[in-house]
Each structure stands twice: as structure tokens, then as C-alpha cells.
Image (cartoon, rainbow, N blue to C red):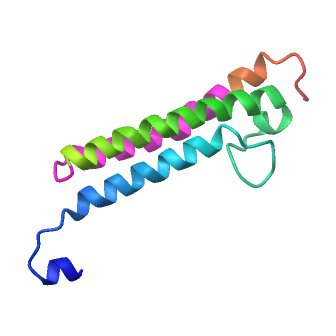
Amino acid sequence: MVLTALGVAVPTAGIINVGIGLLFIVIGNWLGKVRSNFIMGVRTPWTLSSELSWNKTHRLAGKLFVGVGLAQILVGVFFSTHPAAAKVMITGIILLVLVPVTYSWWVWKNDPDRQS
């Protein structure tokens, strides 16, 4: 706000995109190491009833979060004012929801030690 008041052009959209990308990277690095719990993480019925499903799903989700975070940073740096920047974020969030949930079911279905 101070820089804007002083007449300096601040690329707000780019800063926000980079910040969100960094947040996704931090979450992704943490998500791959989280242990099974009922409070945080990808908590589907399948991940909560299968340790294998929990571990594999969270490793995949962590990598996806880092990838989407890197894409968001690149968009923020190079294309922050382009209309495609919002599309990249929305597409990334949809992938972050659908892929881990589907993958958790698939791993659970193939787990011989799963709880029904």
C-alpha cells in the first residue's frame, strides 16, 4: 500500500500468485510425511481404513501440491495479468481434489490388509 501510494507500480496479482504457489509447496512438503489421523490430510473413508492407502495417497498428494505450486509461481512471475492465470489456479485445485481421492480409492481396493 505504501509503495502504491508513492506511485510505484506493484504487481499485486503476481505477488499473490507467487504467495499461493509457495503455500502449496510448503503444504506439499508437509503432506507426504503426515501420519494417519482424523483431523488433517486427505481423509476419505478409504485412507482412514487402510494404512497403505493413506501413505500412498499422501505421497502422491504432496507431489501434486508441489507441482501445482511451481506452476502457480511460474504463472505469477510470467503471466500474472493474463486471464489464463486464474484458469491455471482453478485447474490445479480441481486436480488436487480429484486425483488424490480417486487414487485413494484405487489403492484401498487393491490393499489386501484393508479394513471393510
Residue 79 placement (x, y as % from top left): 19, 45
Q: Quadrant of residue 97?
A: top right
Q: Residue at x 56, y 48 (%)?
A: 27
Q: Residue at x 43, y 51 (%)?
A: 22
**Magenta span covers which residues?**
80-103
Along the horizontal axis of the image, is 20 left or right of 25? left
* Image quadrant containing the N terminus: bottom left
Q: Quadrant of residue 87?
A: top left
Q: Is residue 87 magenta?
A: yes
* Image quadrant containing the C terminus: top right
Q: Is residue 23 magenta?
A: no
Residue 48 placement (x, y as % from top left): 81, 39
* Count of number-bearing discs: 0
Q: Residue at x 64, y 43 (%)?
A: 31
- Hey, which residue is sitting farthest left in the picture? 7
Along the horizontal axis of the image, is 114 left or right of 15? right
Q: Residue at x 36, y 46 (%)?
A: 89
Residue 52 placement (x, y as % from top left): 79, 26
Q: Relative to 105, does residue 29 appear above or below in the rendering?
A: below
Q: Relative to 33, does residue 76 appear above or below in the rendering?
A: below
Secondary structure character of the magenta stretch overall: helix
Q: Quadrant of residue 73?
A: top left
Q: Nearer the viewer, residue 7 or 47?
A: 7
